[in-house]
Amino acid sequence: MTLLRDADIDPSPLRGKQVAIIGFGNQGRAQALNLRDGGVAVRIGLREGSDRAAEAGAQGLQVLDPAAATKDADLVMLLAPDEQLARIYDCISDALKPGASLGFSHGLAIHFGLIAPRPDLDVIMVAPKGPGSALRSLYAAGKGMVALAAVARDASGGAWGLALAYAAAIGCGRAGIIRSTFEEECVADLFNEQAVVWGAVPELLAAGFDTLVESGVQPEVAYLECVSELKLLAELVEGVGLAAMRERISNTAELGGLLGGPRLVDDNLRRDMRTILEEIRSGRFAAQLSEEADAGYPRLRESRRRAAASLLERTRQSLDRSA
Ligand SMILES: NC(=O)c1ccc[n+]([C@@H]2O[C@H](COP(=O)([O-])OP(=O)(O)OC[C@H]3O[C@@H](n4cnc5c(N)ncnc54)[C@H](OP(=O)(O)O)[C@@H]3O)[C@@H](O)[C@H]2O)c1
């Protein structure tokens, strides 16, 4: 693995080029503002009635409808929810100029065939490894965020150079860019979301909270133990790594973790992780995501409603009020 940095990257593939960013959400906003601050010509494509048009306009960005933003653009970045990208591509495909480049920040829509781009288009990916808010604040502080970059189709012969120049222009060359593939980025990202940080960890926190509360511990105490301390863990892991993290905590916590952790993260859990990985690889999850979007997101709406009404959330609010 080579970590490419600004000094290794030729910025010229973006020079004099027009970039269109479709979507002004988490990634779209951050990437557009970083490009603008770096002197790249960027415009925003938003559907009619978008609440975000005013904010993009207030930032001095030109806002057009997605097809108009795409027309004449050399690189069109699709930065809207993955399950919406096929619909968006259908709206802009006639406007994409011959030989333009189509860009993504996640591999799903291309790897699982939700979009089949025209053969004359380069298809690239620059996937920052973190949320847009951090991509923007790091850039503003003169720093950057690590990104994965990849090429799915190199029709022009210059797709990799363009991907690198784009990654550097949004600040990722300050931290490092790793060459990957759409498949690798997409599968690893979905796996983490489902089986590790965004899937397993919140469930583990809630299960720990429930277990203590059911045994008679006050909800506020259970929340402080099982939920609030996650921030301490994240800071230690980020700052010094997993190995040194264990040395930084008390011997009591270190031995307790050594005895308790592997009882939960056992062979059964590792087998279930492999099953989740297989389901991702097979395209089952990508199909479920499209079905959820087509049905109007019933599962997501129900889960948000339940989480907002839960004892855990009410406890968080009561601790916030007393702080
Ligand atoms: N979020 C992250 O932390 C993160 C990190 C790395 C990579 N990524 C990837 O970055 C990409 C963008 O994700 P995101 O989280 O930034 O998305 P997001 O914040 O949910 O995107 C919101 C934007 O998409 C627009 N949009 C939604 N549906 C649309 C449609 N049908 N037609 C036109 N515009 C539509 C919204 O328009 P309105 O303004 O009209 O609502 C809004 O401007 C995805 O591929 C994602 O996997 C995300």
Image (cartoon, grey):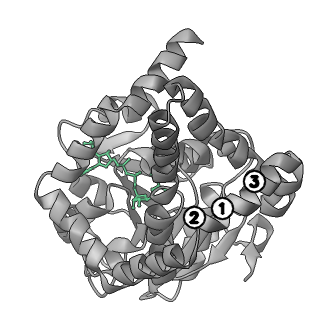
User: Percent x, y for residue 245?
Assistant: 82, 54
Quarter-wise, where is residue 301 in the image?
Answer: top left
The residue under label 2 is: 264
Is residue 74 visible in the rendered image? The answer is: no
Label 1 crowding class (10 Å Cα cut-off): few <14, some 14-19, many 20+?
few
Q: Identity of the amino acid at label 3?
A: Gly
User: Percent x, y for residue 36?
Assistant: 54, 45
Label 3 crowding class (10 Å Cα cut-off): few <14, some 14-19, many 20+?
few
- Label 2 to label 3: alpha-carbon separation: 13 Å
Q: Residue at x 21, y 52 (%)?
A: 299
Q: Is mark 2 within 8 Å of ligand 1?
A: no
User: Percent x, y for residue 47?
Assistant: 21, 46
The residue under label 1 is: 261
Label 3 element class: helix
Q: Residue furthest left?
A: 295
The residue under label 3 is: 256
